[in-house]
Amino acid sequence: MVSVVRGLLKVVNEKGVGGFIKHLREEGYTKCLLDGNLLQTKLHNIGATLVGVDKFGNQYYEKLDVQYGRHRWVEYAEKGRYNASQVPPEWHGWLHYVTDHTGDELLMLKPKRYGVEHRENFSGEGDAYIYHSKGHALNPGQRDWTRYQPWQPAKS
Amino acid sequence: MSALAALKMVKVPPNSASMEEARKQTLEFFKMACRSLPSVMEIYNLDDVVTVSQLRSTISAQIRKNAHIANPKVIDLLLFKATEELSNIVTHSKQRHHVIGQYVLGHEGGLIQDMGTKDQGISEFLKQFYTSNYF
Amino acid sequence: MGFLLRSLRCSKPLFRSYLSHPFPAHFRWISSSSALLRPESSVALAADPPPRTPVAGARVHIPNPDDAIEVFVDGYPVKIPKGLTVLQACEVAGVDIPRFCYHSRLSIAGNCRMCLVEVEKSPKPVASCAMPALPGMKIKTSTPVAKKAREGVMEFLLMNHPLDCPICDQGGECDLQDQSMAFGADRGRFTEMKRSVVDKNLGPLVKTVMTRCIQCTRCVRFATEVAGVQDLGMLGRGSGEEIGTYVEKLMTSELSGNVIDICPVGALTSKPFAFKARNWELKGTETIDVTDAVGSNIRIDSRGPEVMRILPRLNEEINEEWISDKTRFCYDGLKRQRLNDPMIRGPDGRFKAVSWRDALAVVAEVAHQVKPEEIVGIAGQLSDAESMMALKDFLNKMGSENVSCEGNGISPNADLRPTYLLNTNISGLEKADAFLLVGTQPRLEAPMINARIRKTVRATQAKVAYIGPPSDFNYDHQHLGTGPKTLLDIAEGRHPFCSTLLSAKNPAIIVGAKIFERKDKDAIFSAVETIAKLHKVIRADWNGLNVLLLNAAQAAALDLGLVSSPSESIRSAKFLYLMGADDVNLEKLPDDAFVVYQGHHGDKSVYRANVILPSSAFSEKEGTYENAEGCSQWTVPAVPTVGDARDDWKIIRAVSEVAGVRLPYDNLEAVRARIRMVAPNLLHVDERESSTVSVDMKPDFQHQMSLEPFEAAVENFYMTNSITRASKIMAQCSSMLLKK
C-alpha cells in the first residue's frame, strides 16, 4: 500500500495535478468506479510483472504467487468497449497457457510475405464480416465468366 | 420497411363486383407494390442496377398493358396473378437474376423485345437476326 | 474342412478354364501359376478363334498376287504382301499388338520391346514391329509366353516412370496408362530409387517432363524424318539414357507440335495447354483449319464456350496425321481481341457500341448515298464461300462489280480453274520425282505441303530446284536464282536444270501465289507454261503444273468470281466493305471514304473503319472452304459466337435487307443452293475435280517481264492472319523461334 501511494505521489510530482487527472482518465481509473471488472484488473496489477505490450497497446501481466491458472491476464488498451477478440493471435497462446513464449517472441516467427493483420471482431459495430458465397452479387471476388477478351477501341 | 412487413401487406383482394371496385383494387395493388419496392431493392440488392422509380414505371407499364380489359372477373384474375408474383418477389422466392431479367432488362428491350412500329415490314429473318445468331 | 479344400483345389483348373476361355483378353489370373510357366499349356487353348476385323480399318493392297504370303495369327490364316512386319500382319488379322516405339509413319526402332509375340519354332519371343513376316509363320499373340513377356517389359518400363498420373497432362489419353491397365501386372517389385532426368527447354510450344520419358525415340525419329530438323537425339546409355537437344537449343521446326501427339507418355506435352483441362472434359468437333490454304483436318477440343486445344485428324490426302504449329497453337487468338458488339465511330473519332439495328441502318444509308461504282467490297483471307457469295450478290445488287478477295492480286484470271489450283493434289506430289519451286517457300506458306515434298525427297531422292529469295529448306535443294531471269533461262532451255526436268518421269512445277501480285504475272505464268510444255509436265495421266495458294479463302473466291483488283478500285472507293480483310493496303483509300469492317478480330483494318460489325470466327460457324488443291471442306461450329456477333453471311443478308436490296436466301441451304448455280464444285465436299480444260486454251499474253526478283510471301510464319496476330503464343513463337 505504501508503494502504491509512493507511486501516485511520484506521478503527481512529475505531471502536476492536471496532468495526473489526465493520466488517470487515460489509464481508465475514472472508469473503474463503474466497471468493476476493470477495477479488479487494476488491483491485480499491483505487484504483478508486465510481461509485454502488443502493438495495439494491450498490456499483459503475470504474477506467479497467485492461484495457478489465474496468473496471467491482460489489461486492454481500450478501456471502454474491450473484448477478447482484441488480443492478437501471437499473444493468445501465452494468455491462455498454450505456450510459455510471449507474443513478442512469437512475432519473430511470423512469415513476412503472408498473414493478414489481426482485426478485432466488429460484429455489431457496423463493420461485421459477412461471408458471401461464390456467385453472390455482393461477393467482391466474383469470377469473371467471360472466356474471351474483347477488343478495346480506346487503344487506337 | 422490412421484408416481413411488406409480406403482410401482400394479400389477395376479394372479388370485385363492378368495374369501379376492380379499378380501386388495381390501384390498391399498385400502391401495395410500390410500398414493397424499397424492401425489394434491398433484398435483391438492386441499387447499382435500377432505381425505385424505374421499377415503379415498370410495374405501371405492366398494368397499363392490360388497360383495355373491361371484364372485372378478368381483372380479378390478373390481380390475383400479379399478387402472386409480387409475393414471390417479396418473399425472396426469386433470385436476383430473375428480377433483373424480367423487370430491369426487359424494360429496355433487352430480353423482352418491344415489338414496336420499327420492326413492321421487315422479314422474319431480320427479326430473328436482331435477336440472336442462332435460328 | 480338409475335404472342402481339396475339392476346391481340384475344381480350380476347371473353373479357371471355364472362365478364361470366353474372355481371353479381359479375364486373367494375376498370380503366376503353373500354367503360365508352361508354354505348352497354350496349345490346348488355341482352338481356331473366329476371324476378326482388321485393327483401325487396316487394309492391305496386294499389287502382285505372286508376292502374297500367308501367315497364321493365333491360328487364323491371313494373306499379306511380302515385306510386311509381323505387327502389321497381326493388325490385318485384327489383333492389336501393344506398342510404344512403333509408329506407322516413322522408321522402325524396335527398342521398347512391348510388341513381343510368340512365333512358333523361335526360341524367344520376337519384337513383332521389327520382324518381317515370313511365309507360313505361326504367330501367337495371346499365349502365356507373350503375355508374360509383355508383363515383364511393362514392369521394366514402369520402374523408372514416375507415378504422377494425377498431375500429368497426358493422363486419360496416355498409351502407357492404357497399356499398363491392359497388359501390365498389378504390382511392381521395384524398391530402389527411381531415376530422374532434367527437363529440357524445347521452346514455347512443347513442355517436357523428361522423367516420364520411356525412351521410345518416336520424337527423335519424327524430328529427323518428318520435320527434317536434327534437333533431338539420344544421349547416354543404360539408365542414364535421355532424350534431348545436344546443346541448350529450342526446337525450331514448324511441325514441332506433332511430337506432343506421337509421344506415348506425358514426357512431351503442350505448353499452352498445360494444366488447363482434362481430355475427358473436352468436346471434340471435327472441322478444318483455315490458317493456310492446305485446309488441314483438325479436331477442335472445346470446354463450354472456350476452345481448349486443336489436334490433327487423319486425312491421308491432305495432312496425313500432322498439322503445323500455327494450326495447332493459334487457338488462343480466338479468345483475344475479339469484336463483340457492333460499333459506330462517332464524330469525335471514338467507337461507340450500338445495337445491330442502328449499325445496319447507318451502313445502309451510306451505301445509298454513294455512286454504285464507288462501292468496293473486299473479302478477307479467312472468309468462307457462303459469305463471299453473299458479299458478291449484295454488291452486285447495289450495282457494283468491285468485289475481290485479298491475296488474289491484280485482276486475277479465274477463267480456267487449273490456273490457280494445285493440280497434282497434295498426295499426288509423292509421285513426282523433280520439283521446280517458283517464287514459293512451301515451308512457310504451307508446311503440310512442304512435309509431303520432304517425304517424297526422302523416299525417292527427288530433285528440288528453287527460284526465289533465299529461304530455309529442310531437304536437299538447288537454289537456281532469285528472279524471273532464271525462269527465262529454263524456259529457253539454257539452264542446266533443264536436263533434270527432261529426264524426270513426273516433273512438278509449283508456283507461289505471291506472283499474283506482280504486274508481270501474265508473263511469268506464260514462261512457266512454256517450261511445262517443254518438259512434258502436263500429260493425260499427270498434271504437274501447280499453283500454291496462300490463304484459305483464295480458291473459293476465284471459283465464285470475286475477281476485281482491289488496289485499283480502292483509289476511287467511297464505300468500302471489308469482310475480315486485314492485309489490304488502305493507304490509297480517299480520306472521306466510309469503311465498314465486318470481322471477328480487332486487327489492322479496324482502325480505319467507320462501322464495325462483329462476325464469327471459323471455329464458330459452318462454312465451306476450298483448299489449294480445289477440295472443298466444311467447318463445323465448335463453340458459340462471342458477344453479339453473327455469322458472316447473315450479316450481309441483313444489311442487304436494310439497304432495300434483299438477298433471296434465309438459311444456309439456300445460300448453298445459290453457290450451286455459280460454282457447283464447292458443294462437292471432300472431292477433287480434275480439270477438263487444258491450259492451252488460255489466250496468249505478250507482256514485258520485269527482272525484279521474287518476293517472299510470308514474312513471319507465326503471324499471317488476324487470328494468329491476336495470339499470345504465336507472338512468343515469333519472338523466340524466328531469332536470326
Image (cartoon, coloured by chain):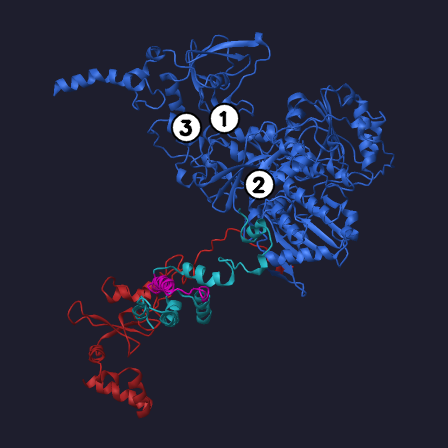
Chain colours: A red, B cyan, C blue
Q: In which quarter of the image is residue C370?
A: bottom right
Q: What element carries label 2?
A: loop
Residue range in magenta is B64-92
Comparing labels 2 and 1, the label whose residue is closer to the camera: 2
Which of disc 2 and disc 3 is earlier in sequence?
3
Which of disc 1 and disc 2 is earlier in sequence?
1
Q: Position of residue C210 (x, y in %)?
A: 48, 36
Q: What element carries label 3?
A: helix
Q: Pick the residue in front: C566 or A2.
A: C566
> From the image, which quarter does the C terminus of chain C lie in?
top right
Check disc 2 and give the amino acid type.
Glu
Which of disc 3 and disc 1 is earlier in sequence?
1
Residue lying at the far left of the rendered structure:
C1
In the image: residue C571, left or right of residue A88 = right
Whether callout 1 and callout 3 share a subunit is answered yes
Q: Is residue A29 above or below residue B28?
A: below
Other residues around mark 1 within 10 Å, as few (<14) / some (14–19) / many (≥20): many
Comparing labels 1 and 3, the label whose residue is closer to the camera: 3
The chain holding disc 2 is: C
The chain holding disc 1 is: C
Q: Is residue A52 magenta?
A: no
The chain holding disc 3 is: C
Q: Quadrant of residue C710?
A: top right
Q: Mark 1 points at which residue?
A: C101
Q: Name the residue under label 3.
A: C179
Q: In which quarter of the image is residue C449?
A: top right
Q: Position of residue A125 (x, y in %)?
A: 32, 73
> From the image, which quarter does the N terminus of chain C lie in?
top left
Residue lying at the far bottom of the rendered structure:
A17
